[in-house]
Structures are given as structure tokens and as C-alpha cells.
Amino acid sequence: MAFDKMIDDEFIIYLTIDGTSYEEVEVKVTDPHKTIRDQISSIVSVFELPKIDNGGNPIQYLLGQIIDDADEPEILEFEDADGRERALVDYNVQPGDRLHLISIPIAG
């Protein structure tokens, strides 16, 4: 199915958020062409996730795609080798795919 034709259809992925009770929650992707960075920002905002940990350190969020049940999520890089921002479409993320939001505190 071409991404252009999905505009009218709902684009639902299943999202698990590390360290929360959110496990395989249905999330509607409004624009699969939005950058990975913007997708993460939207998820953090919608789910009201913390931007700093209890120790006052900033939290970086990464998005991983679960390819095979037995494997760890494959991290979706923000940019390609040329520095171009990447989007879900660049990783061929399809409706029904499982994504994983990973939080990493950045030590100060």
C-alpha cells in the first residue's frame, strides 16, 4: 500500500513505552513523513512523559522498531549518513508495526 493512499485510512502502530504501563498501545500516526525527532516529541507530549529524571538529568528518547519478537528493538536513527532527517517512511514502518519508545537519562 502506498503511503499517499494511507492519508484517508488510519495509520495505527502499536507502541510500548519503557518504564511505563503503556504496552502495545494503539497510536494513530497522523503523518508518517514527519521526522523521527518530531514523532518522538509528539509521543512525549501526548503521553506527558518526563523530560528530566528524578536526579534532574535530561532524558533522551529513542524510537525502536520491533522487527522480530526475539530481538531487541532496532533503533531508528534521527538522520541518515548525509545528515538528512529521517522519517517513519524511511524505515518502511507500516500500519500494525510495533514500535518501542526507549528513555535514556543523560548524566550531567
Image (cartoon, rainbow, N blue to C red):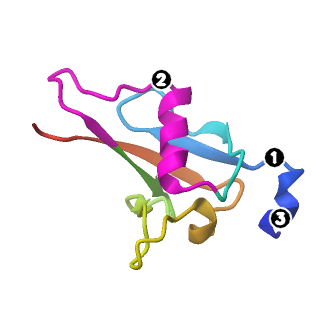
Q: Which mark is residue 48?
A: 2
Q: Which mark is residue 37?
A: none
Say which residue appears at 41% left-offset and 64% top-offset. Answer: 77
Quarter of the figure with residue 15: top right
Alpha-carbon neighbours of circle 1 within 10 Å: few (<14), some, or many (≥20)? Answer: few
Q: Position of residue 74 (x, y in %)?
A: 42, 63
Whether 57 is among the magenta residues is yes
Circles 3, 1 touching at the beta carbon (< 8 Å): no
* Marks 2 and 1, the one that precedes in the sequence: 1
Q: Kindly report the distance in space between the C-alpha atoms of the residues bearing marks 3 and 2.
A: 30 Å
Foreground of the two, 38 or 48: 38
Say which residue appears at 20% left-offset and 20% top-offset. Answer: 54
Quarter of the figure with residue 60: top left
Q: Position of residue 39 (x, y in %)?
A: 55, 47
40 to the left or right of 13: left
The residue beneath circle 1 is 10
- SS for callout 2: loop
Q: Which mark is residue 4?
A: 3
* Marks 3 and 2, the one that precedes in the sequence: 3
Q: Amino acid at mark 3?
A: Asp
Q: Which residues lie in the magenta part?
A: 34-60
Alpha-carbon neighbours of circle 2 within 10 Å: few (<14), some, or many (≥20)? Answer: few
Whether 36 is among the magenta residues is yes
Q: Kindly report the distance in space between the C-alpha atoms of the residues bearing marks 3 and 1.
A: 12 Å
Q: Amino acid at mark 1?
A: Glu
